[in-house]
Image (tube, rainbow, N blue to C red):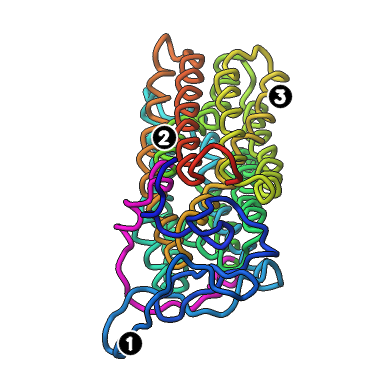
Amino acid sequence: MADLSTFPPPSPTIQSTRVQSFVEEDESKSRVDLETGNEVETVNGADVSDKEVPAQEPSPPNEKSESAVVAIGPPPDGGSRAWLAVVGVSCAGFCTFGFANAFGVFQAYYTKTIPGVDQFSIAWIGSLQYSLIFMPGLLAGHLSDIGHLRPMLVIASAVLGVAIGGASGFLFMPSLGVVPQYFLKKRSTAYGCTALGSSLGGTILPIALRKLMAAVGFKWTIRILGFIIATFLGVMVLCVRPRVNRKKGGKFPIKDILGNRPLLFYVAAVSIMWFGIYNPLTFFDVYAQEKLGIPSTKSFYVIVTANGASIIGRLGSGLLADKLGPLNVQTAFCASAAILTIAWPYTRGFGSLEVVAVLYGICSGVFVSLLASPTSHMVQPHQIGATIGFTGTCMAIGALVSAPIAGQIVATSGGLNFAAVGGYSGAVVLLACLFSLASRYYALGGWKGKF
């Protein structure tokens, strides 16, 4: 069994390093040490930490100190303010991830309207947009941890219209760090609800874009889209409010992150996952038109179907994860998504493609729904934002090159080699699942347990 004593203590839902398993929350509680900002395990109010933390003199007012949490009690696991925060994070997902999930419509549009351009070149547009949602996460997450979340959200919302990619990175990833401040027992359920925004965007926006392009043209379609996104951003700014006050200043916890073996394996898993898991969403529309001969007025509904079905996976996975463990649920559904990714190019009709799209949507929706939940259980509360941001920045590489690689594969054999894309993408996702299993093993110190 691996020695986990050097790793940072887990979150309130995991016992101290002496017993690496989920606890019954009604028997264990946690508190936050006011002087160190570290979480201390308690049972019925008694301290059960592995060792005493010596008292420290408070820093002078003008001296910068480590980022710390001011204790205001355990997460409420509900209430109007908590669920409004979930609504706000969901709106951030609609404007960023949801819009990116609709890129399949633009992929098909650019293929038809830009002469001489191939799938490889067009795919770079969508992949760059995905990548920029995650790339600033390292900086954005740390700024969130040290008390700058609200100004960051306001500024990013203001510039989204002219810099949608970069601004998205200062909205989606840092807003995810607010959820653990409000939820403990229902944390994965809350994360599942936040993911509904991106699913809603991926379902509604493709239909709206298609209809508007036909009615008012491309330019006015983009303008109307801007008004829609501005509305959701307004709701997000009003609702996403940190519950925990942070001390200003503080260093990025790079040593804690790099010394956390379960976390590093998990970051590797989700980074590799991005090389394959969303490739079907990019090419469903093109495949239906080019391979099955489905007209464009109908083919884009495959994307709508997949994104709509992902609502089931996103919400249902949160409920399951609170009972079975977020990494357990995420790994199982991602492995299923890999099999469906391999299978979709072998469909021979619109009906069978729609069936695969439904199943794929449910399984792939679990991935983004639980993306931040395992991470939040691997580090101390005041490091969650930075850790989620670090994970996002690492994922940006896969998000950037995944679609172009798949587009280059499609471009072979006359541009119809979708089976090779499915095989490649599915194999990559299965490889990522192995890294997820390794993360789980090191987090629990063995194979048995809930994580």
Disc number at residue 272? 2
Question: What's drawn in magenta, residue-wise?
Answer: 236-265
Q: Position of residue 246 (x, y in %)?
A: 44, 77
Q: Earlier in the sequence, mark 1 or mark 2?
A: 1
Q: Which amino acid is tagged 3?
A: Val
Instruction: Give the residue at x 45% y 80%.
Output: 34
Q: Which is closer to the viewer, label 1 or label 3?
A: 1
Q: Can residue 223 be seen in the rendering of this structure?
A: no
Helix, strand or loop at mark 2: helix
Where 142 sits versus 422, above or below?
Answer: below
Q: Secondary structure at mark 1?
A: loop
Q: Residues within 10 Å of mark 1 (few under 14, many from 20)?
A: few
Q: Is residue 59 left or right of residue 52?
A: left
Amino acid beneath label 2: Ile
**Residue assigned mark 3:** 355
Circle 3 packing at 10 Å, graded few (<14), some (14-19), many (20+), is: some
Magenta region includes residue 259: yes
Specify the label residue 57 is tagged with.
1
